Image (spheres, rainbow, N blue to C red):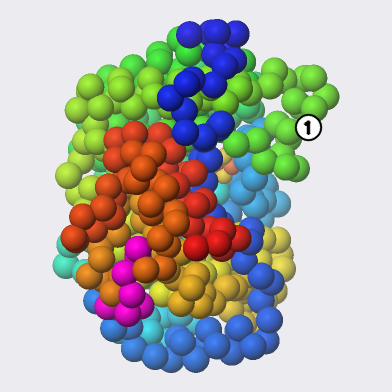
Amino acid sequence: MTKATAQKKSKSDVYTSRENWPPYTYRDYPNIKPETYKAFQEFLNTENTSGRLMELQPWISVCDSKCTFCYFPTAPTNKVQIEHYLDLLKKELEMYAKTKYVKTSLFDEIVLGGGTPSVLTAEQMIDLIDFCKERFNINKEYFIKVTGSSKTLALPKIDKLASYGVYQMDMGAQTFDDRIRKMLCLPDTAADVEKAIRHARKLGLCVCVDLMYNLPGQTMESWLDTLKKAIELDVEIDAYSLHVDPGTMLEKMIKAGKSPPTGNAEFEKQMYLSAYKMLTDAGYKAVGHDRYSRVEWHMRENCLNGWPWGGILTTGAGCFMGYLQRFSYSNIENIDEYMKTVSSGKLPIQRLSESSDDEMMRREMSRLYLRLPVSKKEFMEKFGKLPEDVFPKQLKSLKEKGLIEIDDKEVRITKQGEVWKGNIAWEFAANQPC
Ligand code: SF4
């Protein structure tokens, strides 16, 4: 299908266009206030009785170059004193490690995220992971994941990480089409990415690649070729639809006519459907946000399945995925400001939100966005009500449209609902009446 033939909305469509992100992203959290900081510190002095395993996420918020679509707050590698940053990152980790809540928490994932953690040497990465293993309670079965780009993942570095025990290498491959890679300012070629992946797979590492669709100038053929390559390389796949974020280089390029625009809503949907078909035909299962997995463990990953009651303890400049029970937070983005705040002994939180029961009920419903069922039993235990008592209108309407199923035990999305899972999540957003 070309973009031209995909202009019209199909008759069977329930919504005009697909929402690709649910509500409750960090941008909506309020700036930290003295009272929320106090409440968070009091919370950190309580015991973690959730019984859920958590993810520990130190961020290395630096990159060698800036991809045109990227909205992540990163600093250029050559402007950061890496050793100093690592010292302060450890100081922040230590602040959390000393709290009662973290002392009574158990982690089963250590994820070096960012940014591009692979700008560090293998020794620096291993030292940071060792630090985490010493200071935090780590579950008997645990997994170490490291994000990197092929430009900074020389083969000997991959060897060292594999022999240390890294389980997964995450790579922002985005596309195997060099014409588009160049336009997005990705720092390496498709052949470089392929070489690093093949090497890591040969060593037994799990590799997970981010792939994006509906990129400017991307044809359906280019998208399907990228997917075919990923299947051939036997990797896990996070397939995202491009969102052109305000303030990014890409937004400016499109506005100035220096880049083609993205495809329309119908073309975007067809790209999603084609990927879904090709990947599920190849034995992948769609799980979580946008993951296609052939690895059994990823389907039972605790930080995913525990939403919204598990937790991600994220640290580092600009990190934004932190959530501990009712608290969600993101850190100061400017790396110098971050380092100054940590040096002064304060947690470097920029935005912090404490959810009320009403908000937690809405968050619980966003499990549908993650392709997870909403357990009626758990909902009743937490809130003393059933989902249909709280959201009768939404549940009735979504059921009538064939997007969800409800039985005695749970609410879950249907196959038809998967396409619209973002829209379903928005039905339960705070500005929607029940
Ligand atoms: S490598 Fe990742 S974090 Fe860095 S600029 Fe590119 S997309 Fe953003």
Q: Which residue is painted at 44% across and 70% down in the image? A: 360
Residue 221 among those drawn in magenta:
no
Question: Closest to the observer: 123 or 6?
Answer: 6
Left or right for 414, reference 398: left
Q: Which residue is painted at 55% across and 69% down in the image? A: 329
Determine the secondary structure under disc 1: helix
Up/down of 61 relative to 221, above or below? below
Up/down of 285 relative to 375, above or below? above
Q: Which residue is painted at 26% across and 53% down in the image? A: 406
Chief secondary structure of the magenta span? Answer: helix
Q: In which quarter of the image is ligand 1?
A: top right
Residue designated by label 1: 252
Question: Closest to the observer: 313 or 140?
Answer: 313
Residue 91: x percent and y percent?
52, 76
Q: Residues within 10 Å of mark 1 (few under 14, many from 20)?
A: some
Residue 386 among those drawn in magenta:
yes
Left or right for 110, reference 91: left
Residue 155: x percent and y percent?
36, 34
Q: Is residue 81 visible?
A: no
Left or right for 93, reference 217: left
Amino acid type at image mark 1: Lys
Does mark 1's beta carbon lie closer than 8 Å to ligand 1?
no
Q: Which residue is painted at 33% across and 75% down in the image? A: 385
Q: Quadrant of residue 417?
A: top left
Q: In which quarter of the image is residue 217?
A: top right
Q: Can residue 421 be seen in this view?
A: yes
Up/down of 190 relative to 251, above or below? above
Residue 179: x percent and y percent?
58, 14
Question: Closest to the observer: 378 or 163?
Answer: 378
Query: Bounds of the magenta span?
Result: 381-388
Residue 131: x percent and y percent?
38, 70
